[in-house]
Image: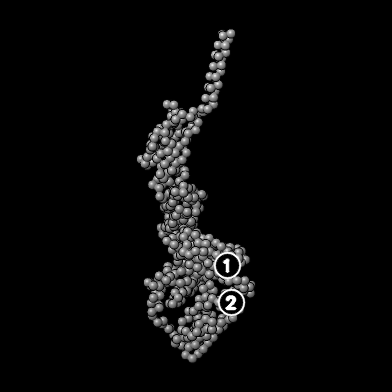
């Protein structure tokens, strides 16, 4: 009996040993080690383990500065970051190396911080003696995707361009939210040029980058004037009081003319009217006006200070009696110039009810109410010289192509635009009212008249709200123009420092 009981105890003990071993094996699995995160800027890294038998783990990590052998966080040494090599981390449990992980942090940063090329930059053909602005402007930055980054580190991307034709250059800007690089200038040499573009992280000493190439073919074109006569810039029409200026030309082939005039604010390069900037009028210097038509460029230097301090010289006509001609009129700004021919060379006085009383200044403005009124009647322009009086009947609505349909649209409301908060910082939010159901167009320009952005709304709401990204523009003052049919309004956007 005692012998059988002893055998039973032995079998029970063996069974307990087998069960406890199975439970221990179930609770233990292979130890695994992996890198959880790495910051390419600071070198800070963390790693984690899974599995194992639950006993303490220590790590060996050559090149990583840690607070203790059991710490799972540290900083990669600066010397190793400057001369990067893959790191091997080993996990030791129960005195044995149970797992290891090799992390190539240099390849990781190249993958995550290098700019991405979205699509190849297409080859370009440009004309020598023709400025790239605005027709052939190439936005290089739009072909790349900015690198990513944490909230505390957003890499700034810049663009390097080599191999451009002589006379061309890169201009643009880079911020945390956008990167733009434009090709600008006027090429001076013909031929085929292989251009290399490198987009890189500009605030990182390792300069993670991506590179692409494209070709620019510069084609020569004749610089001789059109057969109909050379395009010539005449003396501009200038108002010394308001700073309003209108460019005047003669000759040319009838195709559109592009003007450049530093210091003159205009809505687009093809508009011939604008205003001399206030700062320039306070510190007057002669301005150079350039006109380009079909690749042919001519220029005129206008000293508006001398113009405003020197009495105008009256040139006697060669033949003919005094006659009033059709005026020169800008439908957008309301600037009007009385035109005459003939006469005896003495001073000519001009007037027109609703425009101006008697004056010798031929350059005036039609007030806004008269320009937009539905029932505006033709104006009677009058000129008198040495007792002779002549008149001319001028229809503003016909001159600007305002039909009955346009008048009906005008009757629906008056365009009004306001900015929600001025000065603005990175975004400008504007509201436009009075043009519900009409097509609305916007132009954002800088103080030199260069167009920065255009936008169209096919059917405006009763309160049309639009947001413009002004943070990517370096100018401290921008002009935003809204146009709906014959109505327009312009507001200044002042950027906060």
Q: Is residue 240 above or below residue 455?
A: below
The x, y position of residue 186, in whole percent, is 43, 61
The x, y position of residue 382, in whole percent, is 52, 85
The residue tagged 2 is 373
Figure colour scheme? one colour
Q: Is residue 472 toward the left or the right of residue 434 in the image?
A: left
The x, y position of residue 484, in whole percent, is 57, 68
The residue tagged 1 is 433
Q: Give the residue displayed 45% in from the left and 33% down from the top.
A: 101
Q: Give the residue displayed 60% in from the left and 74% down from the top.
A: 402
Q: Is residue 426 above or below residue 410?
A: above
Q: Earlier in the sequence, mark 2 or mark 1?
A: 2
Q: Give the residue displayed 62% in from the left and 71% down from the top.
A: 412
Q: Is residue 157 above or below residue 88?
A: below
Q: Quadrant of the C terminus?
A: bottom left
Q: Secondary structure at mark 2?
A: loop
The x, y position of residue 14, in whole percent, is 54, 16
Measured in 3D between alpha carbons, the distance from the residue under mark 2 to the one under mark 1, in whole angstroms, is 18 Å
Q: Secondary structure at mark 1?
A: strand
Asked whether residue 193 is in view, the answer is no
Q: Quadrant of the N terminus?
A: top right
């Amino acid at each position: 009996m005692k012998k059988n009981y002893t055998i039973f105890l032995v079998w029970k003990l063996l069974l307990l040993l087998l069960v406890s071993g199975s439970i221990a094996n179930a609770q233990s699995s292979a130890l695994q080690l992996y890198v959880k995160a790495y910051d390419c800027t600071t070198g800070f890294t963390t790693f984690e383990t899974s599995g194992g038998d639950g006993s303490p783990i220590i790590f060996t990590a050559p090149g990583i500065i840690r607070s203790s052998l059991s710490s799972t966080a540290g900083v990669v040494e600066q010397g190793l970051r400057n001369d990067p090599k893959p790191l091997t981390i080993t996990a030791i449990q129960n005195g044995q190396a149970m797992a290891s992980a090799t992390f190539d942090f240099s390849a990781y940063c190249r993958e995550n911080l290098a700019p991405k090329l979205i699509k190849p930059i297409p080859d370009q053909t440009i004309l020598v003696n023709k400025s790239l602005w605005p027709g052939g402007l190439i936005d290089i930055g739009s072909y790349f995707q900015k690198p990513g980054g944490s909230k505390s580190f957003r890499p700034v991307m810049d663009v390097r361009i080599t191999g451009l034709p002589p006379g061309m250059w890169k201009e643009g800007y880079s911020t945390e939210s956008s990167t733009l690089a434009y090709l600008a200038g006027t090429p001076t040499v013909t031929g085929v040029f292989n251009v290399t573009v490198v987009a890189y992280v500009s605030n990182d000493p390792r300069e993670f980058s991506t590179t692409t190439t494209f070709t620019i073919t510069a084609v020569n074109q004749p610089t001789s004037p059109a057969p109909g006569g050379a395009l010539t810039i005449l003396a501009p029409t200038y108002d010394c009081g308001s700073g309003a200026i209108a460019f005047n030309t003669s000759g040319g082939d009838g195709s559109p003319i592009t003007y450049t005039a530093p210091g003159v604010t205009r809505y687009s390069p093809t508009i011939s009217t604008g205003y001399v900037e206030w700062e320039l009028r306070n510190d007057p210097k002669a301005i150079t006006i350039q006109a380009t038509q079909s690749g042919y460029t001519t220029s005129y230097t206008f000293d508006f200070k001398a113009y405003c301090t020197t009495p105008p010289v009256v040139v006697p006509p060669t033949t003919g009696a005094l006659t009033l001609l059709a005026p020169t009129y800008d439908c957008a700004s309301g600037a009007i110039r009385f035109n005459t021919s003939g006469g005896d060379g003495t001073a000519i006085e001009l007037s027109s009810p609703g425009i101006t009383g008697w004056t010798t200044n031929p350059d005036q403005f039609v007030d806004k109410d008269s320009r937009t009124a539905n029932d505006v009647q033709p104006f009677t322009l009058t000129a008198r010289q040495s007792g002779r009086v002549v008149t001319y009947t001028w229809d503003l609505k016909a001159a600007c192509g305002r039909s009955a349909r346009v008048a009906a649209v005008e009757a629906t409301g008056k365009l009004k635009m306001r900015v929600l908060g001025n000065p603005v910082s990175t975004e400008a939010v504007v509201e436009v009212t009075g043009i519900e159901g009409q097509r609305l167009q916007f132009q954002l320009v800088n103080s030199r008249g260069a167009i920065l952005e255009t936008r169209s709304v096919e059917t405006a709401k009763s309160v049309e709200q639009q947001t413009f990204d002004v943070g990517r523009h370096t100018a401290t003052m921008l002009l935003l123009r809204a146009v709906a049919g014959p109505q327009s309004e312009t507001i200044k956007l002042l950027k906060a420092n």
